[in-house]
Image (cartoon, rainbow, N blue to C red):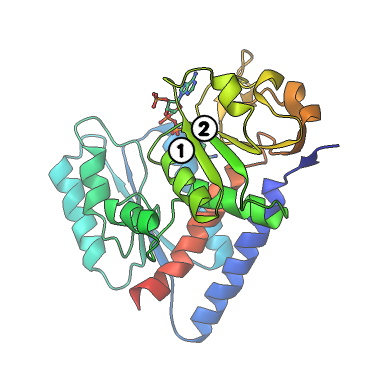
Amino acid sequence: MAVIIDGKKIAQDIRDEVKEQVALLNRQGTEVTLAVVLVGEDPASQVYVRNKEKACEYCGIRSRKILMPESTTQEGLLQVINGLNEDPGVNGILVQLPVPKQINADAVIRAISPLKDVDGFHPQSVGALSIGLPGFLPCTPAGIIQLLHRTGIEISGKECVIVGRSNIVGKPMGMLMLRENATVTIAHSRTKNLAEVCRRADILITAIGQPKFFTADYIKEGAVVIDCGMDRDENGKLCGDVDYSDVFDHTSAITPVPGGVGPMTVAMLMKNCAAAIELQR
Ligand code: NAP
């Protein structure tokens, strides 16, 4: 019988740990502040920002929301980021992506000080992860490592196949699994015989954004399956990249969607905000 990996509970445990950590910092006279910049009025982005604010409130982290109009220029946004970089009262900076098309997202990511880069997207954070130096870890992949650790799943020496090579999920996931001593394969849209490659995996991590793409045919008997997908099925219902009911009986552990990887991202953001204090010291 497969273990259902409970991301909701694990994320709550992490938020509780951060809350304690922040309370301790407060007793020592240190506040933790996250600045969240939202450009435009994209409804999905507004929901994400609201969830981040709520999590901050729960953990005792101050959140400072900076709303900018859709017509904001790149220069205008970079100026705001520079101000936040230099503000000693701000520990973490997050610009909610995507940004409007007149703004280059890479330039925005590069403008955030690596000491305040709580999303872990800055090239310096990515480089630090690659060579094992301290730095912020990107939240979704770091959350997956927590899911595996806290469910008692061994990673060392295991065959791990990650499908998807984005800068925010697939690639950093590969670096993190390597750091955990897994043998890592990163597959993508040009990978040949994908099902065969996936069937090598003791741990299969899917991040492709295609609803219910991975059927039992992609799963080695007894594999651990981690589904990052946040997709919509034919009825508009939230689902993952994995066809959950088809693969369930073939796995030893699996994340549901919703309630698996999803809740971990904001919890890990909170963890990064608290960790920022240490890094800035
Ligand atoms: P992305 O930037 O669109 O990247 C998708 C990756 O999947 C690409 O590397 C692409 O390959 C690969 N791919 C697409 N179709 C494929 C196929 N049929 N076979 C093999 N590989 C295929 O996506 P992302 O931002 O990494 O997000 C992936 C999923 O994770 C989405 O559902 C997203 O909503 C979800 N997500 C969830 C969270 C969370 O908090 N839970 C956070 C981030 C993302 P190429 O590089 O060759 O094009």
Residue at the spot x=72%, y=46% of the render? Answer: 6
Residue indicated by mark 1: 170
Question: Which residue is farthest bottom?
Answer: 28
Q: What secondary structure is marked by label 2?
A: loop
Tell which of 54 and 232 is nearer to you: 232
Give, as a three-letter code, the residue at label 1.
Gly
What crowding class fits label 2: few (fewer than 14 Cα within 10 Å), some (14-19), or many (20 or more)? many
Q: Which residue is farthest left?
A: 75
Decide: is 131 above or below 255.
below
| Placement of the C terminus among the 4 image quadrants | bottom left
Where residue 32 sits in the image (x, y, percent)? 43, 71
Whether residue 232 is visible here, answered yes or no, is no
| Residue 31 screen position, x and y as percent | 43, 75
Residue that label 2 marks: 207
Question: Of residues 136 and 128, which is closer to you in this image?
Answer: 128
Residue type at tag 2: Ala
Q: CA distance from mark 1 to mark 2?
A: 7 Å
Q: Are marks 1 and 2 in contact (CB under 8 Å)?
A: yes
**Ligand 1 within 8 Å, label 2 CB:** yes
Residue 130 visible in the current orientation: yes
- Quadrant (top left/top right/bottom left/bottom right) for the N terminus: top right
Dividing the picture into quadrants, the one containing residue 82 is bottom left
Tell me which label, 1 or 2, sits earlier in the chain: 1
Please state the horizontal and vertical placement of residue 227, each as a whole percent of the image.
61, 34
The answer to whether the beta carbon of the residue marked 1 is less than 8 Å from any atom of ligand 1 is: yes
The percent position of residue 172, horizontal first and vertical second, equals 43, 46
Q: Secondary structure at mark 1?
A: helix
User: Left or right: 199 with respect to 207?
Assistant: right
Point 47% across, 34% down: residue: 186
